[in-house]
Image (tube, rainbow, N blue to C red):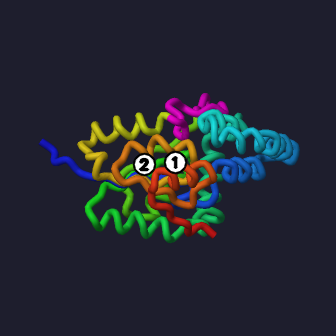
Amino acid sequence: MTDIQKAVFARVEGVLLAKGVRSAAAYFAANAPGLRERALRLGHVALTAPAYQWLGQTDRVLANRLAYLSLRNLSEDRIAELSEEYWSTILRKQILNDGVELLKRARREGNRVVLVADSLDQILQPLAAEIGCVDDYVCNHLEFRNGLATGRLVDPVVGGHDSGVWLSQYAQEHQLALAGSTAYASHGPDLLMLTAVGRPCAVNPDFTLRRAATQARWPVLDYHV
């Protein structure tokens, strides 16, 4: 029988990266083929920005669905190419080193390190490889038909208030003890993920999470600049 182990779950956006879904969507839109197409896609990103900002605290799943709609009809090859460019030219320079150190220390202490991200798998894969101490990750995946993105995300969509349920299921599947595990997160919708573990910690928290963490007397780390 597999021994029960402990894990560290880290929300990528806010803990490891200052940039999130909107930044990636804007990059893809700005590099779409043709001036007219670029303008249309950037217009979509701009129009949905206020809704994303509001939904980020109420329905992060819908917020992510709206953001990725701007990728509709981009080819799978083009998205892979843009993801690589976005990683190498933008994100790689934006990694929050303090967050990386949190995970490396956790790995040295014998924890399983799991990333949780709103980002697409094409972006998260090189990030996990760069960090080097990641055992597993869960992220969002675009739906493709005939080699083109439909603009939809494959269910289940990461980012919602069901993160606590997912974490409990994951822990059961991998023989993890949640009471001895840690979670790092930065946004209000991650509250249920944080309450599912014995050692929650708010990192660079938004207003909602900071208030909740203060009331619950959870540790709060601020290192984002």
Q: Could you say where residue 163 lies in the image, as x and y percent from the top left?
A: 46, 39
The amino acid sitting under disc 2 is Tyr
Indicate the quadrant containing the N terminus: top left, top right, bottom left or bottom right: top left
Question: Measuring 50% from the left and 61% from the top, which residue is drawn there?
Answer: 220
Q: Earlier in the sequence, mark 1 or mark 2?
A: 1
Figure check: 157 above or below 3: above
Task: Determine whether label 1 and label 2 are within 8 Å by CB.
Answer: yes
Q: Is residue 29 left or right of residue 94?
A: right
Bounds of the magenta span?
Answer: 143-161
Figure check: 27 above or below 44: below
Q: Could you say where residue 30 lies in the image, as x and y percent from the top left?
A: 78, 51
Can residue 149 be seen here? The reply is no
Q: Could you say where residue 133 lies in the image, as x and y percent from the top left?
A: 37, 62
Q: Which residue is mark 1?
A: 117
Q: Is residue 12 left or right of residue 167?
A: right
Q: Which residue is mark 2?
A: 137
Q: Nearer the viewer, residue 75 or 159?
A: 159
Q: Is residue 133 left or right of residue 176?
A: right
